[in-house]
Image: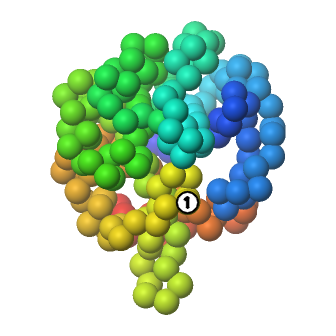
Amino acid sequence: MLRSRIIPCLLLRSGGLVKTVRFGADKYVGDPINAVKIFNEKQVDELTLFDIDATAKGHEPDYDGLEIIAMESRMPLCYGGGVSSAAQAARIIALGFEKGSVSAAAIERPDLIREMADAVGRQSVVVTIDVQPRRFRGGYAVYTHNGKRKRNDDLLELVAKVADFGAGEIVINSIDRDGMMNGYDLALAKQVRA
């Protein structure tokens, strides 16, 4: 049986850390370097950082800020936000991150996943998918751009597709549960896992 892993997820906005509720109502909660130091001491298994504005505002990752975080960290790191090319993913890995996460760009152009896997290795490619339950039709709707753009993709077909294209890991974010402190959507997790 696999051992449980503790992987905190930090949300970056304008260089600071924020806490959101259902992808909105963000509240500033601190400095990312201080958080990295705390999680170093707690000996978490991995740390994931998402710049939640990068794609929505059309800007690239903050490579200088990421380099500082990587130098401070004593745990494996994953970064997502604004990644839209294999070259960007390779640059993030070169800074000291073990994984690069892609969302909107990979959903719009799945070949990007294969390109990233060829450049940095499949184990370093994470595809993040944001979802929300459909109210009337059932199942889950897929969103990009920080939950602002609804897609027509079927979630389970999309999960199979990104795996086939070379994703080493898939992160599913439940928009309705974000920041609500009421646990994970286990039914969703079981569907995706199957």
Task: Tell me residue 98's x, y (percent).
Answer: 41, 24
Residue 39 or residue 34, whichever sits in front: 34
Q: Secondary structure at mark 1?
A: loop
Q: Residue at x 56, y 23 (%)?
A: 62
Quadrant in the picture for the C terminus: bottom left
Q: Is residue 80 visible?
A: no
What residue do we see at 69% from left, 27% from top? Answer: 15
Q: Judge left or right: residue 135 versus residue 108.
A: right
Front one among 31 and 76: 31
Q: Amino acid at mark 1?
A: Lys
Query: In the displayed structure, would residue 159 be above or below residue 188?
Result: above
Vertical side of 104 occupied by 159: above or below = below
For residue 93, what is the image quadrant? Answer: top left
The residue that label 1 is drawn on is 148
In percent of width and height, residue 41 lies at 70, 21
Q: Quadrant of residue 45?
A: top right
Instruction: Give x and y (percent) for residue 5.
Output: 51, 40
Q: Is residue 126 visible?
A: yes
* Way the structure is coloured: rainbow
Task: Say which residue appears at 40% left-offset and 41% top-offset.
Answer: 102
The picture places residue 43, in percent across and down from the top left corner, at 63, 26
Which class describes the residues within 10 Å of circle 1: few (<14), some (14-19), or many (20+)?
few
